[in-house]
Amino acid sequence: MGLNRSAWMALYYIDQQGQLNQRDLANLIGITGPSMVKIVNQLHLAKLITIAVSAHDRRERLLTLTAAGSDLLAQTIPLAESFREQVTAGIPQADLNTLAQVMEHMMQNASDL
C-alpha cells in the first residue's frame, strides 16, 4: 500500500499514542471526519491498524497499530527524518521553534473561527 501524507501521519500518531479514537486522530492530522473514515478504512483493509469499539461509548472507534503497521512505520521513519533534515538544512533551530509556535497559534485561530 502506498501511503499518502495523511495515512502516514495516522500511523505515526497511533504509534505515538498507543491507541486513538478516530475523532482525536482527525484533529491531530487536521482533516475532516469523513476524510478520516476513508483513511481508517484503507489502513484497516491493508491490515495496518485494528479497529475496536470502545467499552464506554459504542459510537467510538479505537485504533491501534498492527505488527505490519509498526513495521511499515519503522521502515518509513528514516525517510521522513532524512526529508526533514534536507528541507530544514541551514535554518537555525530557534527559527524552526518560532515557526512551530506561529503555526500552532494560526491553527488555533483557525479552529476558533
Image (cartoon, rainbow, N blue to C red):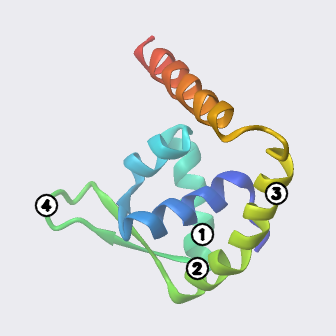
Q: Nearer the viewer, residue 56 or 5?
A: 5
The reply to whether the C-beta atoms of the residues labelled 3 and 1 are less than 8 Å apart is no
Q: Nearer the viewer, residue 10 or 22?
A: 10
* Residue at (84, 47) in percent of width and height: 89
Q: Nearer the viewer, residue 59 or 12?
A: 12
Q: Position of residue 4 (x, y in %)?
A: 75, 57
* Residue denoted by label 1: 43
Specify whether residue 47 is in view. no
| Amino acid type of the residue that numbered disc 2 sits on in the rendered structure | Gly
Q: CA separation, marks 2 and 3?
A: 21 Å
* Residue denoted by label 2: 69
Judged from this view, the residue extending furthest toward the bottom is 67
Question: Regarding mark 4 in the picture, which secondary structure is present there?
Answer: loop
- Count residues near mark 1 (Cα–Cα under 10 Å), then give few for <14, some for 14-19, many for 20+: many
* Residue at (37, 60) in percent of width and height: 20
Q: CA separation, marks 3 and 4?
A: 40 Å
- Above/below status of 84 relative to 71: above
Q: Of marks 4 and 2, which one's residue comes earlier in the chain?
A: 4
Q: Position of residue 91 (x, y in %)?
A: 78, 38
Which of the labelled discs sits on residue 83, or is there none?
3
Q: Which tag is nearer the camera, tag 3 or tag 4? A: 3
